[in-house]
Image (cartoon, rainbow, N blue to C red):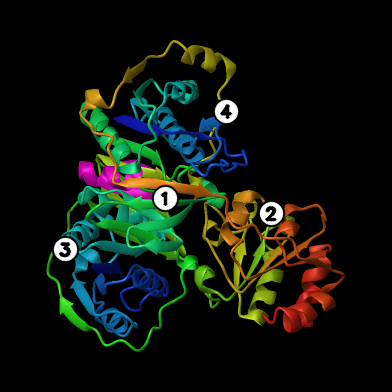
Amino acid sequence: MAILVIAEHTNVALGAATLNTVSAAKAIGGDIHVLVAGAGCAAVAEAAAKIDGVSKVLLADNAAFAYQLPENVAPLIAEVGKDYTHILASATSIGKNVLPRVAALLDVDQISEIIAVESADTFKRPIYAGNAIATVQSNAAIKVITVRGTGFDAAAAEGGSASIEAVTAGGDAGISVFVSEELAKSDRPELTAAKIVVSGGRGMQNGDNFAMLNRVADKLGAAVGASRAAVDAGFVPNDMQVGQTGKIVAPDLYIAVGISGAIQHLAGMKDSKVIVAINKDEDAPIFQVADYGLVADLFDAVPELEKAL
Amino acid sequence: MKVLVAVKRVVDYNVKVRVKADNTGVDLANVKMSMNPFCEIGVEEAIRLKEKGIATEVVAVCIGPTAAQEQLRTALALGADRAILVETAEELRSLTVAKLLKAVVDQEQPQLIMLGKQAIDTDNNQTGQMLGALTGYAQGTFASKVEVAGDKVNVTREVDGGLQTVTLNLPAIVTTDLRLNEPRYASLPNIMKAKKKPLEIITPDSLGVSTASTVTTLKVEAPATRSAGIKVKDVAELVEKLKNEAKVI
C-alpha cells in the first residue's frame, strides 16, 4: 500500500495539521508520501521530508497552486494520486475545499473527517454533529479521506529523511482567480493547535468584553474561541467559532466562559482533556461535561482568574 | 440568469438524535424533519439575487424521499419559482447526489448553483465540491458573501484564520456558510401560493445515474459520554485544582 498525504501549508511553513494526518497514514500502514503543492514552497517540502515516517516528498511548485485554488490543485492531486491506495488530507478549510473535488475526479466516494483507523479500509467518523459515531468501510480502489486532527496525535516533525522529487503536472484551469485574503493577525496560538483554549459565549454581552478573555489567554499562552451564539450576536468573527459549524478543538484545557453548552458547541470541544466552565446559571448544560464547574458571574470570576494566574 | 438551489431533507436542527439499539443508524421514527439549515441559506441567497434583478428564475432541486416534497414546497413558499424532486428512498452518498445534480444541471443549464456547505446529518461537506469536479465549474465554498458581476461571481469564503475572496467564471458553484444571510420565514399567503407552483418528480434512473456506492456503514454507535466533574466554590479553588490535580497550567 502507498499513501499520499496532501501537505497543509502557507508556501513558507508546513501546517501543524499535516503531522496529525501523517499519524493517520501511519495507522493505515504503508509507504507514506507527502505532496506539497504550492508556489515557492521548497522550504515546506524540506520540512515535510523531515517528518518521521515519510519516505518521499513530491513537490509541485507552480504559481497556479499558490492559493490552493481547488480548480487548479484538485486535478494535480487526482493525477498524482491515481497510483496510490489512499489519499489523505487534513480536514481544514483547504482540505475540505479541495479533496471532495479530487474524489469526484477519481470517481470514488470520500470519507470525511475520520477520527480513528480500524483497518486499511475501515474508519470511524462522527455524524450528526458528533452525536453518533459511524464505522464505515470502503471498497474503493483509491480511498480518499479527510482526517480530523484531534483524532490523531501529531507525528514527530523531525527524524525523517525523505527524498524530494519534483512534479510538473497540472496548471491553471483558468476559471478561478484569487483576489484577496484577510487573515486575523494574532500573536496567540492557532485555535486548533493551542494547548489551552479560552472561549466566550453569549454571556460575554459584547465584543469589547472579550478583552478580559484575551488577558487571561495571554497569561496562559492560550488561544481565544467563541460559541456560535457569540458569533451570531456579532461579538467576534466567525473564525473564532468552536462547534459543529466552526472549529473542532481538543486542547489539554478548555475554559468555557459564559457558554451555556448548546449541543452544537459541545460537538466542537468535548474531546478536550480538561474542561472548565464558568457560568452564573448552575443548570447550564455545559456543567454536565465540565471537569471543574464554577457557578459565578463571569464579570467577577474572569478578572479574579487573571489575577490568580 | 437562472439559479439552481439544492436542498436536503434532514433531521431538524433542534432534535437531539439517538442511536438505534441495534447500531444500524440513528432513530428517525417520528422525528421532526426540516430543510438543512445551510440549504435554507442557499435558498435565501438565490431569492435575494432574484429580488435584486440578477436572477431571473430560481429552481429548487432535492434528491430524497417522497416526503421531501415538503422541503421543496418550503423553498417554493420562500420564493423559488419551481421545484424538481429526484425521488429515491435510498440514502445516497454525496458522490451519487453530485452525479444526480450534474444530470439536472445538464438539463437546466443554470448560471449559478447554490448548495449548503454541509448537511447536518452526514456532516460530509462534499457535494458542492464534487459537483464542481463533475461539471468542470469553479467552486466558491463556505461563502459569506456572493456578488455577481457580469459573467463572473466574487465569493468571499470563510477559511481557517479569516476570509478569502475569489473570482469565479460563471457558471459556478457556491456553497453557503452561516454568515451569508439570515433566512426569512415563509408567509402564509406565500405558503398557499407555493402549493400551486410546479413541482416535477423524476427518478435517478431517468437521469441515467447508478446509485451504487463504494462505502458501507458497518455500524453507528453513541459517542463516549463525558461525565460531569465537580463544582468548585471559587476562583482560588479552581486555580489550585488546575495546578495540582489536573496539572494543566
Q: Mark 2 lies on which chain?
A: A
Residue kind at label 4, given as amino acid type: Tyr
**C-alpha separation, residue under disc 2 versus residue under disc 4:** 27 Å
**Where is A259 relative to B23, above or below?**
below
Of all residues, the one furthest to the top in this rendering is B196
Badge 1 vs badge 4, beta-carbon distance below 8 Å: no
| Residue picked out by circle 1 | B142
Query: Disc 1 or disc 3, which is closer to the eye?
Result: 3
In percent of width and height, residue A92 lies at 41, 62
Query: Disc 3 or disc 2, which is closer to the eye?
Result: 3
Say left or right for A208 vs A138.
right
Q: What stretch is highlighted in magenta?
A: B127-149
Q: Which chain carries label 4?
A: B
**C-alpha separation, residue under disc 3 versus residue under disc 2:** 45 Å
Quadrant of the image for the N terminus of chain B? top left
| Residue picked out by circle 2 | A261
**C-alpha separation, residue under disc 1 versus residue under disc 3:** 30 Å
Say left or right for B126 vs A203.
left
Badge 2 vs badge 1, beta-carbon distance below 8 Å: no
Residue kind at label 2, given as amino acid type: Gly
**Where is B58 relative to A212, above or below?**
above
Quadrant of the image for the C terminus of chain B? bottom right
| Residue picked out by circle 4 | B185
Residue at the spot 34% in from the left edge and 83% down from the top edge: A52
Residue kind at label 1, given as amino acid type: Phe
| Residue picked out by circle 3 | A83
Of all residues, the one furthest to the right in this rendering is B233
